[in-house]
Image: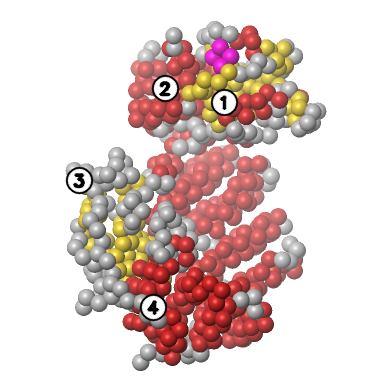
Amino acid sequence: MRNKFVIIVMLLCGLAVNVLGQEEKSRLSGFMGSPVAGTRLEIQYDPTGGPLVGKEAITGVAYMYNDYCWEVADVDLSEYKGIWYGNFYVPRNCAFVAFKFIPKDVNDMGVADNNDDKGFMWVTLDQNGQQLPGGRLAWAIFRKPSLGKGVMGYFNQYDISDEAVEMWMYKELEYFPQNMPKMFDCFMAMVKLRSGDQYSDAARRYITQFLSIPGLGEQQYLWARDLYRFELRDTEKADSLEQMILANYPHGAAARFKTFKTIEQMPLDDVKLDSTRKFLADFPISEWRKHPEQGQHAFIYYSTFRVLEEALFAKHDYEGFASWFDQMNFQTLNEVYRWNIFRMFKLKLSPDEVIYPLSTAMIEEMMKKQDDLSFMEDVRYTPGQAREIARRQLDDKLTSHILLLTRMEKYEETLPYFENLSKEGLYSNSDLNEAYIQILEKTGNRSKIFSVLEECVRENVVTPAMLEMLKKVYTEKYGKSEGFEEYVQSLKSMKELEEMKKEVKAGLTNVAVEPFVLESMTGKKVNSKDWKGKIVVLDFWATWCGPCKMAFPGMQMAVDKYAKDKEVEFYFIATQESGDKYKQKIKEYFAKNDFTFNVLYDNYNEKSQSANVVFSRFAKMFNDSGIPRKVILKDGVMRYTSGGYCGSPSKLADEISYVIELLKAEK
């Protein structure tokens, strides 16, 4: 029997009737008609005519509406003669499914095929050919992104009419009136959309009728409370409902959030720490994990552990710090490690002996939890994407741990951790690569050094010291050093080199530069007018800029390559510096290092109280004030510029070298 609330709703607004249209032919095929829940679909995707043409690897994403909740899954595909094939199991409670196709490379996630913004989507059927609960509702809210109840980011501009949303929502209620408690938030969003100035009166009637339905749970009462508080601005009724919720659900979502917000406002002292510990005892994370519908509360535990662990570390309560590791998920462990362990290690703010046991324990815990999917964030990422994010983060933290062990000369202890690095993580960090060679030497694995160095060159993540060692090993192996440069080039990926060259060519410029005069570190004046007929590489950097100094080994490789070339000059311009001691700091820095750079000081700007006059002129040209910044001039004209640091000395050297050779080849 249809419940009283739904009857009233239908009398107030009336029922719209329509039929679900058929999906027109698209790039997705392999199955006929509406998918049947509880069966496996054969997927065939032809990228021809779409945005994924030419992509080397393609994968699928499935969005499902299962028992009135959105879920996401991966669809693995394999290619045969230009067509991508796969299969997908439709869950038995799945009432609606939509697909999109994306490049498998997570660095290329900005491109997607959603059927030219029309969607690959179907309302599913059960084994008897009937639509399942939630199907009509999902058909409405998925295609109305502006309602905020579907999957955000699927469509670019597509948005069905308000009338269509109303029609499909009422059809859902017509067939499944008993499920109003599961869809009330969506229903009220539609009411607000359609009732205009009458919303306040309509909302009050609907909420009153809704609260009369027996058997409502905390989530339903929270919907009603929030409508009163935020939509109707009725504080009295919102507070009354909240008191009822807190009384009936003393350890529920509302009590959890209220307690969290109270503790969050406290000053960071022992009272807050004691309150935080009590919060975690009263609202154990294990209980929250039993209620996926409260997924939005994940940030509460993330924030709570982050603050608690930072405070314990600062108090040197390392035993207390370690006692929470088993309760944290991978995403939280990753952040706690970054802020406490990595920061202390990188900046040398704590003794290595203190960091070491904590880092070891956290790394072990992260390796156990790397597949916990904590990066999914509801349906923002698929399980596969969440695992890929976790893998990359684990690579990063393993790298830090290995470098810590290397600095402590615990070489044997590092070896098992290398086995847990992905191939990409193993050779993608120049500091780690250099440490790996050192570890192999110290652990009696010298025979592996040559092959590891070759692999590092293939990945093009090589430091000057590694290149020198490779040359030494090469000479020992072949009895000569002739042909070494050609040998190194032969190891590198031609595809990556061609991609780099393509990017460089696309970044070429032709902008005249106003002449300037700067003071060198030796006190000599350098005038840019004297650079006529030369190619000049400028590196804008600062003593406070970590990435600037990280890029120096790569720049040294480029400087060494052109050291005897009278057509090419390099200048390293210290910019955005302030105070009266930075010049002395620069001299001390270069005295401690082996960089053979010509250093210039940017001119002082009275207005900004910073030495940034020349760089500010350049920054206006490329509309970016970030450093490090490379600028390459020819005959006083800016011909190329790039910002940031790629993380690989050898890649940076290749980039600079290629630009120089392009400019030298010009007539």
Pointer 4: what residue? Answer: 170
Query: Which label number is shown at residue 473?
Result: 2
Q: Amino acid at mark 4?
A: Tyr
Indicate which label's residue lies in the foreground, 4 or 2: 4
Amino acid type, mark 1: Lys
Q: Position of residue 325 (x, y in %)?
A: 56, 61
Residue at x-position 68% and y-position 19%: 600
Please provide percent x and percent y for residue 245: 59, 83
Q: CA distance from mark 4 to mark 1?
A: 61 Å
| Residue depth check, mark 1 versus mark 2: number of the one nearer the observer | 1
Labels 4 and 1: the sequence-earlier one: 4
Q: Seen in the image, is 56 located left or right of residue 370?
A: left
- Which mark sits nearer the N-terminus, 4 or 2? 4
- Seen in the picture, residue 21 relative to 208 is either above or below; the reply is above
Mark 3 is on which residue type?
A: Tyr
Distance from the alpha carbon under mark 1 to that under mark 3:
44 Å
Image side of residue 11 versus residue 562, left or right: left
SS for callout 3: strand
Q: Which residue is found at the position 58% from the left and 50% from the top?
A: 338
Q: Which residue matches tag 1?
A: 630
Q: Secondary structure at mark 2?
A: helix
Residue 637 painted magenta: yes
Q: Is residue 599 visible?
A: yes
Query: Residue at point 41% right, 60% down?
Result: 159
Q: CA distance from mark 4 to mark 2?
A: 76 Å
Residue depicted at x 48% and y 72%? 194
